[in-house]
Image: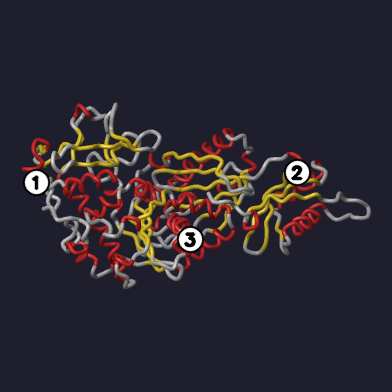
């Protein structure tokens, strides 16, 4: 996290040495407090909720009018979060949350210096109700369903918040702000808003820009007056996690045109620069996450994320993700599955080794003994049983490859369609940002080889990691970044792919490796 500048913060820890009341100065306690805050912030308007007014006199007298005021900036001035004793020491903290449908990542930050104190990731507890968004939306429509979805999410968050606070010796009341970035449905479930119409015509959410909500209203066990900033969304299918991602990428500060791609449940794409932004979303994500292959898994320790095949001997070199997040050749306990980046690597290497043809079909002569038939479907043995961590062979079926071909074709078609819409050739893209876990592991050269992404210089591709969390963190720390989040949302033009006439024609042309038009991929040598 970049150095945090106090002057830009919208959540402040303001020291106040107030003069005690006397016969000569009989200003009311709350008025005295407001006067001190206005002076310290050079502000014209300060708001104090009645819950704090009720305890102001007792608190001020307890600390001899030597206090710290935690405050946050709102549209028409500043608002008091809480009052602390100045001599007690201690800073103020905030939480940034990546509100994923599968995984939640919670980051504890010092709001005074911008440093990351700690971070934890854990499975979204709503998975027990439904692994996908659509199932949860349907569940929410039943009596008590929406409350159940919100309650299990908030309860788990409170558990993790408590653990973070205890581990870092922090009083939860000193956590005075929170920033949340998630897709539109996850945001609705977090806030307890009915997501019914998100997946039904005319596909609209309850709200696009929820703004600031107090933690008390949500049942979070941080300071009751802490503001919770929820990243805005653009309609039902382009959420606040993408707004945060655009903010984190910095593409809105550049003159050159950039792509930002985030692959999750869907593939979400943004193209633009400091002057304009266009976005779209399409169903290319699950296969690219490893969700189509029979041995497909999310990225985790023991999962294959890189594959190399010797083009002469056709020997496989398998690398897996380790517990520390690093890669190394599989040894000891064998691989247990393959993630999206590993699947892309594998298919690219099979093509370069002439073990599959340009249609993605197995070539029996070059696959040799690795090619077997299971239930009348051809399978390639990637890891034999004796080398597998599951005790069973890890295989890639013809059906798996066909699914990846459709997904990679969808991805390339989405990119081509949105670039054509703004009349910018793919070769003129200055930077290509890849976000999320997928972006952390993907080998751009392999993705180019199978025709999933444009054949651009490798240095064009930049992996950004968890941009949802990074953007949420930036918006938590900086008033400028918080404002930029909403400006980004207002600037985006959303392209609806379902009504694009040329999409299916482009899609059909992209269902070959790398493409029916080989001139689009000059760096991929023709081997078949």
Q: Earlier in the sequence, mark 3 or mark 2?
A: 2
Q: Of discs 1 and 3, which sits in the foreground?
A: 1
- Which class describes the residues within 10 Å of circle 3: few (<14), some (14-19), or many (20+)? some
In this figure, which residue is indicated by the disc labeled 2?
A: 86
Residue tagged 1: 363
- Looking at the image, is 251 positioned above or below residue 263? below
Q: How is the image coloured?
A: secondary structure
Label 1: how many Cα within 10 Å (few below 14, some 14–19, many 20+): some
Q: CA distance from mark 1 to mark 3?
A: 52 Å
Left or right of 305 in this view: 24: right
Q: Are marks 1 and 3 in contact (CB under 8 Å)?
A: no
- Where's residue 399, x and y in %? 16, 46
Quarter location, residue 254: bottom left
Residue most toward the bottom?
Answer: 423
Q: Residues within 10 Å of mark 2 (few under 14, many from 20)?
A: some
Q: Is residue 443 left or right of residue 146?
A: left
Q: Which residue carries the number 3 mark? A: 207
- Which residue is pictured at 64% across the width and 43% down the height? 174
- Residue shown at the point (28%, 29%) measured from the top left: 331
| Distance Cα–Cα, label 3 vs label 2 | 40 Å
What is the x, y in percent for residue 397? 16, 42
Instruction: Kindly indicate the quadrant of the structure image that contains residue 41.
Output: bottom right
Q: Nearer the viewer, residue 437 or 102?
A: 437
Q: Of helix, strand and loop, which one carries label 2?
A: helix
- The tag earlier along the polypeptide, 1 or 3, is 3
Instruction: Calculate the distance from the C-alpha at mark 1 to the C-alpha at mark 2.
Output: 74 Å
Mark 3, mark 2: which one is toward the viewer? 2
């Amino acid at each position: 996290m970049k150095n945090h500048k106090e002057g830009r913060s919208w959540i402040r820890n303001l020291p106040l040495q107030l003069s005690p009341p006397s016969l000569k100065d009989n200003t009311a306690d709350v008025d005295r407090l407001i006067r001190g805050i206005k002076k310290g912030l050079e502000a014209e308007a300060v708001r104090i909720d009645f819950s704090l007014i009720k305890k102001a006199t007792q608190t001020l007298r307890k600390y001899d009018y030597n206090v710290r005021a935690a405050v946050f900036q709102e549209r028409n001035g500043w608002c008091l979060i809480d009052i602390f004793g100045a001599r007690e020491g201690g800073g103020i903290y905030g939480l940034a949350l990546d509100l994923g449908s599968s995984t939640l990542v919670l980051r504890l930050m010092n709001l005074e210096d911008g440093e990351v104190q700690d971070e934890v990731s854990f499975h979204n507890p709503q998975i027990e109700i439904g692994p996908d968004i659509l199932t949860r939306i349907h569940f929410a429509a039943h009596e008590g369903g929406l409350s159940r979805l919100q309650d299990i999410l908030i309860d788990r968050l409170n558990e993790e918040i408590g653990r973070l606070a205890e581990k870092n010796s922090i009083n939860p009341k000193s956590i005075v702000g929170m920033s949340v970035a998630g897709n539109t449905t996850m945001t609705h479930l977090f806030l307890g808003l009915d997501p019914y119409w998100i997946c039904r015509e005319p596909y609209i959410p309850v709200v696009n820009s929820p703004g600031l909500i107090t933690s008390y209203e949500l049942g979070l066990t941080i300071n009751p007056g802490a503001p919770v900033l929820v990243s805005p969304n653009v309609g039902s299918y382009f959420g606040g996690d993408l707004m945060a991602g655009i903010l984190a990428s910095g593409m809105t500060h550049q003159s050159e045109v950039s792509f930002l791609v985030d692959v999750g449940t869907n593939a979400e794409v943004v193209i633009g620069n400091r002057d304009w932004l266009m976005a779209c979303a399409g169903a290319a994500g699950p296969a690219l996450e490893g969700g189509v292959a029979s041995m497909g898994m999310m990225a985790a320790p023991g999962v294959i994320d890189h594959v190399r095949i010797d083009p002469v001997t056709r020997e496989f070199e398998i690398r897996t993700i380790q517990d520390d997040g690093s890669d190394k050749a599989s040894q000891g306990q064998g691989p247990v599955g393959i993630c999206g980046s590993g699947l892309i690597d594998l298919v690219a290497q099979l093509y370069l080794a002439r073990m599959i043809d340009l249609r993605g079909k197995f070539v029996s002569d070059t696959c040799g003994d690795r090619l077997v038939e299971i239930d009348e479907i051809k399978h390639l043995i990637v890891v034999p049983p004796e080398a597998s961590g599951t005790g069973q062979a890890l295989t890639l079926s013809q059906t798996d490859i066909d699914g990846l071909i459709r997904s990679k074709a969808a991805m390339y078609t989405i990119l081509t369609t949105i670039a054509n819409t703004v009349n910018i050739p793919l070769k003129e893209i200055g930077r290509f940002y890849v976000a999320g876990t997928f972006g952390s592991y993907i080998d751009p050269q392999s993705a180019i080889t199978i025709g999933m992404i444009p054949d651009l210089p490798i240095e064009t591709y930049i992996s950004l990691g968890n941009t949802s969390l990074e953007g949420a963190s930036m918006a938590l720390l900086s008033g400028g970044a918080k404002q930029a989040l909403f400006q980004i949302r207002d600037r985006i033009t959303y392209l609806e792919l379902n009504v694009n006439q040329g999409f299916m024609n482009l899609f059909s042309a992209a269902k070959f490796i790398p493409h029916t038009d080989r001139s689009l991929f000059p760096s991929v040598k023709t081997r078949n």
